[in-house]
Image (cartoon, helix red, strand yellow):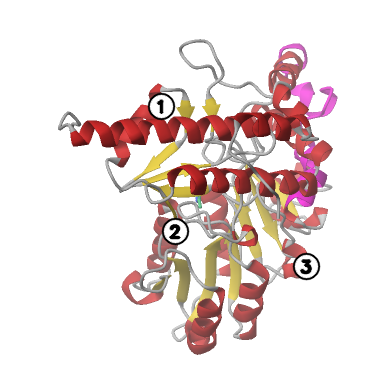
Amino acid sequence: MTHYSTDRDSALELDAIDPLAPYRSRFHIPKHSDGSDTIYLCGNSLGLQPKTVRQYVEQELTDWAALGVEGHFHAKHPWMPYHELLTEQTAQIVGALPSEVVVMNTLTVNLHLMMVSFYRPTPTRNKIVIEADAFPSDQYAVASQIRYHGFNPDDSLVELTSRAGETTLRTEDIETFLAKEGDTIALVLLGGVNYYTGQAFEMERITKAAHARSCTVGFDLAHAAGNIPLKLHNWDVDFAVWCSYKYLNSGPGSLAGCFVHERHGDDQSIPRFAGWWGQDKTTRFLMGPDFTPIPGAEGWQLSNPPILSMAAVRAAMEVFGEVGMERLREKSVLLTGYLEYLIDQNLSGRVRCITPRNANQRGCQLSLVVTSSGKNVFKALTERGVICDWREPDVIRIAPVPLYNSFVDVYEFVKILSEIMENGNRRRETGKWKEV
Ligand SMILES: *Cc1c(COP(=O)(O)O)cnc(C)c1O
């Protein structure tokens, strides 16, 4: 148990002894209107830009200008095998073998491609299980897959809900559910970290319970990749997908990741939607009519990828390669624990945290319910240079990111939030507070 304290000096002290503090200067921190750094707590939505991105993208622009099509083989980093430059670090981030991962497409596209291969419903086993507050894109994707196969989401889409009075799911309840209903379930698809509550699911236990009933298991790691340590290979997960623009800092709409477990990677009996970039590299340019996939996750690629976007991913991955998930997680637990502590000390009774208290059941994000005039609080935060995000009806999501956020960031955020809430209460008492 770390002993935090509430004064600003102790925040400065924590920054002074933080071994990852120098990494902040490797990122562009957006500025507030007064020229100071914003307090950016929104890396769960869009990660900040590593300063090396510009140079990496410019290299490809230069090579394209100078070489044209020859860049595929003669660019400084030839475009043909460019995605391979991302494999090693991507595999480390998600705990996979290099052959199990590939960077391609975008998240929802990859989710569909994975469901084409791994959602194989039958008349008696056709359900997909998701969490009740799953990200909308995932809900649309699974419902459309169910319809595509001729089933009805009203019957085949199962949403796991928390117990009455609780905000997060208990692993034992998921296990009990799977034990009971497992033989009607084709696919269990959960977020590794729920985007709304910030709950990190116990992926190993859930995978085990699902496999015991022969259900396939996939995870959407949009909020987990680069946030919490993952061991997809050892946990025996069937497939996973994630985007790279949240904790992985690769730029808006940048390319996504995909994991296919080794035991499926060479199985050509699994149906898939194919494209030429998944074709065996030695015969791809023979342009023949027969599709022979590259073994492993790469065999699910469709297209010649966007190199400019991939250059940004490469710059971002290199930072992760240097730091490593272990050191990131160590700081993350300390930093989010500090946020939790300051909220408890300064805002208890006024702000309720719906993210699990146990650090093992969350990443860096805390989701705070601000029941009285929440949206006004959010607006006031923005005015004072705090960038965070608001989810209807009354949740503010705060993500202190260990790569570039400081303990002083967290201290200043709680101080500003406390001041805003005190002012709000005072104004409401005198009748001047306007609800918007
Ligand atoms: C951010 C996020 C997405 C976004 O999907 P895109 O295809 O990248 O637009 C999907 N699912 C989850 C859980 C997310 O957090």
Disc 2 marks a residue whose amino acid type is Ala
Q: Is mark 1 within 8 Å of ligand 1?
A: no
Which residue position holds label 2?
134
Disc 1 marks a residue whose amino acid type is Thr
Q: Which mark is residue 382?
A: 1
What x and y, as percent, mark residue 176? 52, 84
Whether tag 3 and tag 1 are in contact, CB under 8 A, the answer is: no
Magenta stretch bounds: 64-93
Q: Is residue 414 magenta?
A: no
Q: Is residue 34 visible?
A: yes
What x and y, as percent, mark residue 377? 34, 35
Q: Is mark 2 within 8 Å of ligand 1?
A: yes
| For marks 2 and 3 on the same chain, the one whose residue lies earlier in the sequence | 2
Q: Is residue 84 magenta?
A: yes
Residue farthest to the left, as pictured: 431
Q: Main secondary structure of the magenta part?
A: helix
